Structure formats: C-alpha cells, structure tokens
Image: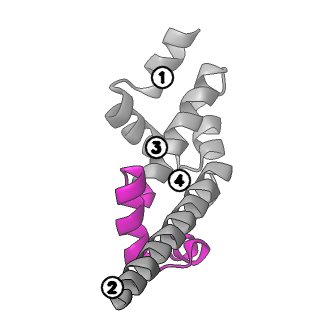
Amino acid sequence: MLLARLIGRSSTQRQRGVFKGIEQARERIDDDPSAPLSLGELAAIASVSQFQLVRGFSKEIGLTPHAYLVQRRLQRARRLIGEGAALADAAQASGFADQSHMTRLFVRAYGMSPGLYAAAMS
C-alpha cells in the first residue's frame, strides 16, 4: 500500500513537472512567435524529450507545438494586416518565410486571402 502511494505520488509530481515545462514552452512561443524556434529548443525549455513535448503539448494545449506556433504567427499577421501593414511586411514580422507561405496558411485558417482581409478591414 505504501509503495503504491509513493509510486502514485512520484507519478503525479512528474506530471506536474511536465505540465509546468509545457507551460514554459507555450510561454516561449507566446513571447515571440516570429522567432525561429526548433522542437529541440522547446523540449530543452520544457526539460522533456521532443516526443514527450509533442505528446504533452497536444494533450494540454490541444495542438502540436508547431501548429500552435503557426496559429500564433497567423494571429499576429492578421493583427498587423488589420492595422494597415503591407502583406510582405506582415509576413516577415510574423515569422513566415515569405508572403506566399503566409498566404497559403492564412487562407487555410481564415478562408480568405490576406489581401481580401486587408481590403475588408480598410
């Protein structure tokens, strides 16, 4: 009985530690989604393996780290475009490789091109 409690307790403590690491990785993405960031770097921040990061991030956040990063970049691009930024400038400031990369993902996420979105916002 005592052994089962100790095993359960250490497992719970480990889960809390993993969750805290996942939160730190999420916060790192939120701090600057435009910065280049690898899965290895996020795993190091979270103090877990890359596999544990992807699995834990998906479980806690509902998205993989990459999908979450892309979502945050798209949100930033949408905000910049809404504020009147040129599309190429919004793509660069949001961390996309180029405007066409942003456009493909923007259309997939929002159902309209960034140009149409910009026109609707002006």
Drawn side of residue 16 relative to residue 89, left or right:
left
Drawn side of residue 39 relative to residue 112, left or right:
right
Figure colour scheme: one colour
Q: What stretch is highlighted in magenta?
A: 38-66
Q: Who comes first in sequence, dot 3 or dot 4? A: 3
For the residue labelled by badge 4, is the local secondary structure a helix, a strand or a loop? loop
Residue receiving disc 3: 71
Q: How much space separates mark 3 and mark 1, taking CA atoms?
A: 18 Å
Residue type (three-letter) at the residue carrying disc 2 = Ala
Query: Which corner quadrant holds the N terminus?
Result: bottom left
Labels 2 and 3 touching (C-beta < 8 A)? no
Q: How much space separates mark 1 and mark 4, taking CA atoms?
A: 18 Å
Select label 4 or label 2 by which is in front.
2
Residue that appears at 32% across and 36% down: 108
Residue receiving disc 4: 97
For the residue labelled by badge 3, is the local secondary structure a helix, a strand or a loop? helix
Q: Who comes first in sequence, dot 1 or dot 4? A: 4
Q: How much space separates mark 3 and mark 4, taking CA atoms?
A: 15 Å
> From where the camera sits, is residue 49 visible?
no
